[in-house]
Image (cartoon, helix red, strand yellow):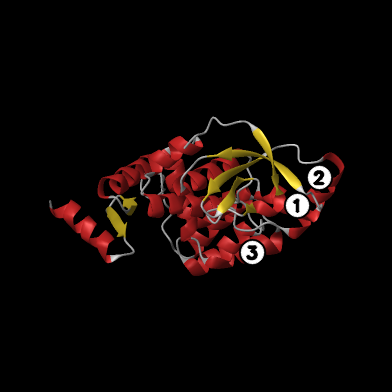
Amino acid sequence: MNAVDTETVDIDIDLLQPNPLQPRGQILPDSLVELAESIREHGVLEPLVIAKTPAGYQLIAGERRWRAAKLAGMPKLPCVVRETSPQGMLEMALVENVQRVDLNPIERAQAYKRLIEEFGLTATEIGQRVGKSGPYISNSLRLLELPDALKDGLLSNSITEGHAKALLGLEDINLMINAYKQILAESLGVRSTEELVRRMKAKADIKPKTKREYEHTEDVAKMEQEISEAIHTTAKLYRSTKGGRLILIFKTADQLDTIHKKLTS
């Protein structure tokens, strides 16, 4: 992947295609209208980053600007053309969006998951590419374990990542959803949500988790990451004073066969 090309060229807007690997899942129409008005007045101030592929020019970064520019009736757009691979396109789109804080936490976690499943990257390798630690990547992936209603809440910005991480401590799906409803009804902040989670655990006679016993600490996340890298699959580690659980996740028979060979060799 050539990441040093900085020459800007004007490309016909109709020749540009969306990136099929774009990590951003949704672009709100209202935000496009506002950006289109700005583009009509000031033009596109930052070049788009595109890749030349056999199918044509595909966007790596700047899909929102491209869509808004089409609304604004712009005939051409300033672009920087990069030579890259499908993996490189996903990585560059992910890095650009993370650096601009454009991605929703769920979209970000889904992109990390794709890099693991489609390209075989480890949490550490992803972290190196996006400027985050391996444990940070592992903890972000835990957001995908949330019930669909809560993931939708994150996608729609009804709750924040802080709310979601607090709710993960409940483990029970019904308790999570009940807590989520109360957060929306009472407009609870993160601190209030953490207190709500503590009360719900006590009421449900769930033994409060100490940091050493149950929380997904950095040490646990690091061990989880190392196990995942060693056997080339996603591992989930849950520890307690009485033991714990290690869950290995596979999606195909080939992945299961690989795990079996790693564990028995």
Q: Amino acid at mark 2?
A: Ile
Q: Which residue is mark 2?
A: 39
Whole-percent x and y of residue 192?
63, 52
Residue under the point 30% across and 45% down: 229
Q: Which residue is mark 1?
A: 68
Q: Between residue 214 and residue 232, name the one nearer to us.
A: 232
- Spatial separation of the CA atoms under disc 1 and disc 3: 37 Å
Left or right: where 226 falls relative to 14:
left
Whole-percent x and y of residue 150?
57, 62
Task: Tell me the SS state at disc 1.
Answer: helix
Sequence-first tag of 1 and 3: 1
Q: What is the crowding at mark 2: few (fewer than 14 residues within 10 Å), some, or many (at least 20)?
A: many
Residue 182's disc number? 3
Task: Tell me the SS state at disc 2.
Answer: helix
Of circles 1 and 3, the one toward us is 1
Q: Between residue 186 and residue 87, name the one nearer to us.
A: 87
Give above or below for 204 relative to 9: below
